[in-house]
Image (spheres, helix red, strand yellow):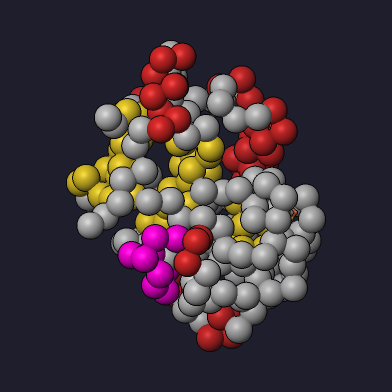
Amino acid sequence: MTNTLDPELAGSQNPDALPDIDIGRRRLLVAATGAVGGAGLAAASIPFVASMNPSERARARGAPVDVDFAKLGPGEQVTFEWRGKPVWILRRTEAMLKALENPGHLVKLADSDSKVKSQQPAYARNAFRSLKPEYLVLVPICTHLGCVPTFRPDVAPADLGPDWPGGYFCPCHGSKFDFAGRVYRNVPAPTNLVVPPHKYVTDTRVSIGEDTR
Ligand code: FES
């Protein structure tokens, strides 16, 4: 059975709107989604949490979740819940995609070719770790100790240095990931972020938890 999350039910940044995520992760998730707006950046990370009653939530823990992301603009990211975990969909811009293929960037990554098979389905073992280059579907749980990284699309910010091309930064112990969820070398996180099983139902609708065949 598939549970459909209606984008009109988008939640606020209130941690209480995330009932199935533990308190520490709720706070980190809220921090992650709030950081971009606070920085006044053009790109945005949009909290997107459906309202579900307890029985619906129980089904959602195991069932695929159907998400409509038609309203997502370039550079925007949406958050929703699947099996009690946050999942992000990022609509990447042309500049983001170009940066992911920059040879100078690739040599900084620990697993640029997604060789660790446990971190993505076979159909996401490609340059963008996705079925469609424009859209990234990701479980944003740091592979070090489980914090939720922050969305940092700002290029060359003071705290991340002049070479930062945009990506995800885990504030817990400083791990860095790019906009394909690939981990940098020499950070605490050992592997890339997880790409969950998913398939497109329509061009702007994706089912998380179901594999593309
Ligand atoms: S949990 Fe992310 S760096 Fe430690």
Residue 51, percent across and down? 44, 19
Residue 109, percent across and down? 61, 76
Observer-nearest of 156 and 63: 63
The total number of labels drawn is 0
Residue that protrudes farthest toward the left in the picture: 202
Residue 106, percent across and down? 56, 80
Task: Please give the name of the residue rendered at 49% of the width and 25% of the height, measured from the top-left corner.
Answer: 11
Task: Please give the name of the residue rendered at 29% of the width and 31% of the height, measured from the top-left corner.
Answer: 2
Left or right? Give the position of 41 relative to 187.
Answer: left
In the image, which residues are magenta? 120-128
Q: Is residue 131 above or below residue 4?
A: below
Which corner quadrant holds the N terminus? top left
Was residue 207 drawn as part of the magenta stretch in this picture? no
Q: Is residue 18 above or below residue 152?
A: above
Q: Is residue 180 above or below residue 18?
A: below
Left or right? Give the position of 53 relative to 131.
Answer: right
Observer-nearest of 163 and 61: 61
Was residue 126 drawn as part of the magenta stretch in this picture? yes
Q: Is residue 142 above or below residue 182?
A: above
Task: Please give the name of the residue rendered at 39% of the width and 72% of the height, measured from the top-left corner.
Answer: 126
Majority secondary structure of the magenta segment?
loop
Residue 69, percent across and down? 34, 41
Left or right? Give the position of 67 relative to 37.
Answer: left
Task: Please give the name of the residue rendered at 26% of the width and 55% of the height, measured from the top-left corner.
Answer: 212
Which corner quadrant holds the C terminus? bottom left
Q: In the rendered image, is residue 148 in sight? A: yes
Q: In the rendered image, is residue 166 in sight? A: no
